[in-house]
Amino acid sequence: MPPLGKRFSLDDFDLEPIRSYLATLGYDIDPRTLVDVPEQRPSTLCYLVVDDRLLMLRRRKEPFSNHWTAPGGKLEPGETPLEAIVREVWEETGLKVSGLSLRAICSERGGEAYDWLLFVFRATACEGEVKASDEGELRWLPIAELDQWPLPDVDRKIMRYVLDEQGPYFLRVVYTPDHLVGEFEVKPLAEGVR
């Protein structure tokens, strides 16, 4: 990890666990080919779908403060994206997720709190009880009513790819200064690398 106060750089991060994980899925991909700038930090999101509802988190801090989004967080050194999402969902929700599938890898650019290389998962089952989170309020939102909730613009755009049965996808997002989606590109993951 970079020293305190130094901006993150993918060049300082051990990418072998990410490369190995992608290889187990049949993708021989160098993670560096998935980013536009080295400041994009590896992270995860998990859309947990149970009984036509999504478990969503109303974030207390950036990115997307006060918006509802999926739980997740940064990869720690030595973790695969799968290990990171299981840990992050547990830490943020108290749930042990299962039925996980990688639905997309999303290259996001938009400034310090918005430069990510997101590994986006869908989970279809969980064990345990939802517990309070320091990250924000947790709530099961009916998929059919998501238009009524303040979700980030990017979540509304990527959700259709996360919830469909195709994929996985490679998504490239560039944010406007007000954190709306300015550019949005979608490809099958196998075609998404340069």
Image (cartoon, rainbow, N blue to C red):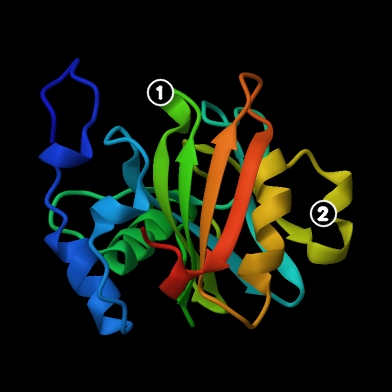
Q: In which quadrant of the rendered image does the C terminus lie?
A: bottom left
Q: Nearer the viewer, mark 1 or mark 2?
A: 1
Disc 2: which residue: 146
How far apart marks 1 and 2 lie (CA) works out to 28 Å
Q: Is residue 173 visible?
A: yes
Q: Is residue 57 visible?
A: no
Q: Residue at x 53, y 74 (%)?
A: 123
Q: 31 above or below 128?
A: above
Q: In which quadrant of the rendered image does the N terminus lie?
A: top left
Element type where label 1 sits in the image: helix
Q: 88 above or below 125?
A: above
N-terminal-most mark, 1 or 2: 1
Element type where label 2 sits in the image: helix
As shown in the figure, which amino acid type bears the numbered disc 2? Leu
Tag on residue 112?
A: 1
Give the class, few, some or many, for how many residues have Cα within 10 Å of label 2's Cα (few <14, many ≥20).
some
Left or right, 76 with respect to 186, comes to: left
Left or right, 42 with respect to 128, comes to: left
User: Measured from the top left, where is residue 11 in percent x and y?
Assistant: 15, 39
User: Measured from the top left, where is residue 24 in percent x and y?
Assistant: 25, 82
Left or right, 81 with respect to 138, comes to: left
As shown in the figure, which amino acid type bears the numbered disc 1? Glu
Between 84 and 10, the residue placed more toward the observer is 10
Q: Residue at x 38, y 52 (%)?
A: 91
Q: Residue at x 61, y 81 (%)?
A: 166
Total labels drawn: 2
Q: 84 above or below 167?
A: above
User: Measured from the top left, where is residue 95 in percent x and y?
Assistant: 47, 65
Q: Residue at x 66, y 20 (%)?
A: 178
